[in-house]
Image (spheres, rainbow, N blue to C red):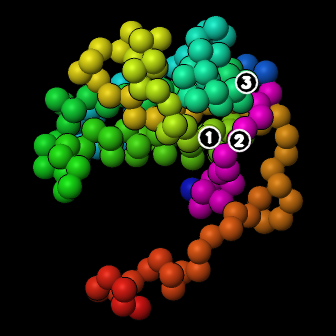
């Protein structure tokens, strides 16, 4: 599958099959994360692959009771390390959150290409996630995603086509607001 097909195929999955992810497929997902770019190649990140059923349920509860999260055989927790990040990231201060997000996006596309599903989870109690996974205070929890085989087929249509804004509404030429 080429990258554009993976982009078109990727969707937010909220119902997962209990089927385990084979070790070689999981290794490929980790490699997709590892190869992601980061500012100055600092790689200010760590990723926790949570497979323990009890911990997955507790993470789902800490994600404001998004219980579907626990239905996947793996939850990937993306953590940023501000002290290791590039320090001059526009209005963001440092690059850790952006770098982790890029790496997780690599995961979502690799997962789609491998027939796996993901769903960005940005709504969570960071303090609780930190406690559950023994994450030190110097490390930020940026986002989570369940990872597993979808329990159902994608919606009908062009690979589950998603409603998108028209190009003229989102692309400008040379100056903001100019087409």
- The residue under label 1 is 119
x then y, percent, for residue 169: 51, 81
Q: Which residue occupies 32% across, 41% down?
A: 97
Quadrant that contains the C terminus: bottom left
Q: CA distance from mark 2 to mark 1?
A: 6 Å
- The residue under label 2 is 13
| Helix, strand or loop under label 1 | loop
- The residue under label 3 is 71
For residue 8: magenta? yes
Q: Is residue 49 left or right of residue 38?
A: right
Q: Which residue is at the front of the view, 4 or 127?
A: 127
Question: Which residues lie in the magenta part?
Answer: 4-17
Q: Badge 1, how many Cα within 10 Å: few under 14, some, many 20+?
A: some
x then y, percent, for residue 78: 43, 30
Looking at the image, tell me whether mark 2 or mark 1 is earlier in sequence order: 2
Q: Which residue occupies 83% across, 55% down?
A: 155
Looking at the image, tell me whether mark 1 or mark 3 is earlier in sequence order: 3
Looking at the image, tell me whether mark 2 or mark 3 is earlier in sequence order: 2
């Amino acid at each position: 599958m080429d990258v554009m097909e993976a982009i078109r195929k990727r969707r937010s999955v909220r119902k997962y099959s209990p089927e385990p992810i084979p070790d070689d497929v999981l290794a490929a997902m980790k490699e997709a994360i590892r190869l992601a770019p980061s500012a100055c190649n600092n790689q200010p990140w760590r990723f926790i692959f949570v497979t323990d059923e009890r911990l997955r349920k507790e993470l789902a509860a800490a994600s404001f009771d998004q219980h579907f999260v626990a239905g996947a055989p793996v939850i990937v927790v993306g953590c940023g390390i501000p002290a290791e990040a590039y320090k001059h990231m526009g209005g963001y201060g440092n690059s850790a959150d952006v770098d982790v997000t890029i790496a997780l996006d690599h995961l979502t596309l690799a997962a789609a290409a491998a027939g796996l599903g993901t769903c960005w989870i940005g709504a969570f109690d960071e303090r609780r996630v930190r406690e559950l996974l023994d994450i030190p205070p110097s490390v930020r929890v940026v986002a989570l995603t369940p990872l597993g085989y979808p329990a159902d087929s994608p919606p009908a249509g062009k690979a589950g086509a998603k409603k998108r804004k028209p190009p003229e509404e989102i692309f400008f030429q040379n100056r903001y607001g100019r087409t």
